[in-house]
Image (spheres, rainbow, N blue to C red):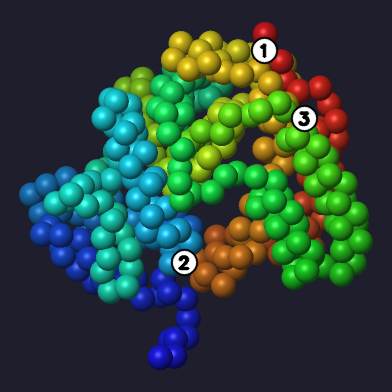
Amino acid sequence: MTEEPGHPFDALTPDLIMDAVESLDYVCDGRLLALNSYENRVYQVGMEDAPPLIAKFYRPRRWSNQQILEEHQFCFELFEHELPVVAPLEIKGQSLFTFAGFRFALYPRRGGHAPELDNLDNLYLLGKLLGRIHNIGAARNYVHRPELDTQTFGHSSAALISEHYIPPELKLSYDTLTRDLLQALDETVASVEAPQLIRVHGDCHSGNILWRDDNAHFVDLDDSRMAPAVQDIWMLLSGDRHRQMQQLAEIVDGYNEFYAFHPRELRLIEALRTLRIMHYAAWLAQRWDDPAFPPAFPWFNTPRYWGEHILELREQLAALNEPPLALM
């Protein structure tokens, strides 16, 4: 059987989306709102005589069913411990469903806005919540989901960009820089004695936290994997070094009420930041055949983008040689 031309998500029409939801005995009212998601496709679906639901359709061939269900199970564990995580709905004992070749899950809708991360009181609360999340995340390991490591996020990303995307006039600069950068990353990670890998959110930036009534709801654990606990902390930091240390102190004060933070992991912050930058460029490259990406990221894969990317990586190489952030 030959594949139809186009991208798999091209078949995800409004009628198919509502038919998929109604296959689980819901009745849609015809209202459909696409939400801001690119890796997967996520929609708010109106229900007759009931609040809207969120339908998440998974990108084909990214995660296996076992890997998706492991993330769901982690969400259920957190929810059972009364943590404010938006977990998928279980229907007749299942949380992952298929329809017309697509895998999907349903979620309750939760309102809110991104938290104000300049507010130290907010960071203290987020620290307490992350401490509770990690206390549960450390109770068992993922079996099927991967680790966050320098090979996948760093070496593989650099190889893909160098071979297929970097402009010829920038290739020597990129290859020389990433060779030194990857060596520094490997050495930095190796220098941290016995970092504990636990189940983490994995993409814990402000866009994945809904703030409402002085509380937070964590959403979208799609990138959850085994990683050091600091992976869920460093993305909450911003500003100059002094400001980041103030923010870090508030987060860790709250965090330590429920789970012990290991200060040795502070050395990993710039390494993890660098890996995210490298992986993000490779992610955009790998998804460029998805018709949703060029309109959303028109600046990608231009000479200016690659020039700025190289400059950003140079700054990260310098940052890796600076003393790590310290607890105040």
Residue marked by disc 3: 191
| Residue 169 at x, y percent in the picture | 90, 67
Q: Residue 327 carries which label?
A: 1
User: Dividing the image into 4 quarters, which one contains the C terminus?
Assistant: top right
Residue marked by disc 2: 61
Q: How crowded is mark 2: few (under 14 residues within 10 Å), some or many (20 or more)?
A: few
Q: Is residue 271 left or right of residue 177?
A: left
Q: Residue 25 carries which label?
A: none
| Secondary structure of the residue carrying numbered label 1 | loop
Q: Do the residues labelled 1 and 2 touch (CB within 8 Å)?
A: no
Q: Is residue 300 above or below residue 6?
A: above
Q: Do the residues labelled 3 and 1 touch (CB within 8 Å)?
A: no
Measured in 3D between alpha carbons, the distance from the residue under mark 3 to the one under mark 2, in whole angstroms, is 35 Å
Q: Is residue 158 above or below residue 198?
A: below
| Secondary structure of the residue carrying numbered label 3 | helix
Picture residue at 44% right of the left edge, 90% below the top? 2
Picture residue at 51% right of the left edge, 33% below the top? 198
| Secondary structure of the residue carrying numbered label 2 | loop
